[in-house]
Image (spheres, grey):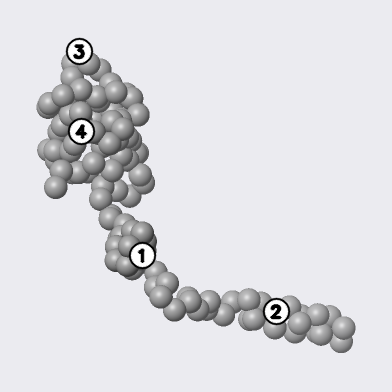
Amino acid sequence: MRLLGVVVLCLLLACGCARKKSTPSGNTPGVSKSFPVSTGTNATLLVTPGKQLSGRVSSVNPTSRFIIATFPIGSMPFPNQRMNVFREGLKVGVIKITGPQRDVLIAADIVEGECRIGDEIKAEQ
């Protein structure tokens, strides 16, 4: 009889933990959030984070003018896509994605400018 009580108690605890968690209002999954930014005056700017494709330069071959780029899992650029290369916020080059792709790495040709390891890569707009 004691074993039956323990089993029932475990089932009740499991059912209580398995219920669907509700999301707080305004925090809908998959919807981008906007953040108000104070400008020091009465006006308030509304800043919305973008979902722009971006990556980093992992390796550079300046002689053959190609790079190996790293992108986050699930967001890889398309072949023949042109992308800008930035260093400390300034545009320093343009690359063209050529492939091959392996996991989060992909090869690209340097079309204009130069690239260094650690430079940021963003899609052209």
Q: Position of residue 80 (x, y in %)?
A: 12, 38
Is 72 on the left-hand or right-hand side of 114? right
Point out which mark residue 63 bears: 3
In what element is the residue under mark 2?
helix
Q: Position of residue 21 (x, y in %)?
A: 53, 76
Between residues 121 and 15, which one lies in front from this camera angle? Answer: 121
Q: Residue at x 87, y 83 (%)?
A: 2
For badge 3, the amino acid type reads Thr
To which residue does mark 1 refer?
36
Displayed quadrant of residue 8: bottom right
For badge 4, the amino acid type reads Lys
| Earlier residue among tags 1 and 3 | 1
Q: Residue at x 28, y 55 (%)?
A: 50
Q: Residue furthest right?
A: 2
| Earlier residue among tags 4 and 2 | 2
Q: Residue at x 73, y 78 (%)?
A: 10
In what element is the residue under mark 4?
strand
For badge 2, the amino acid type reads Leu
Q: Position of residue 20 (x, y in %)?
A: 52, 78
Mark whose residue sits in front, 2 or 1:
1
Tag 3: Cα neighbours inside 10 Å, few (<14), some, or many (≥20)?
few
For badge 1, the amino acid type reads Pro
| Earlier residue among tags 3 and 2 | 2
To which residue does mark 2 refer?
13
The answer to whether residue 32 is above or below residue 8 is above
To which residue does mark 4 refer?
91
Mark whose residue sits in front, 4 or 2:
4
Between residues 20 and 115, which one lies in front from this camera angle? Answer: 115
| Earlier residue among tags 4 and 3 | 3
Q: Residue at x 14, y 47 (%)?
A: 125
In what element is the residue under mark 3?
loop
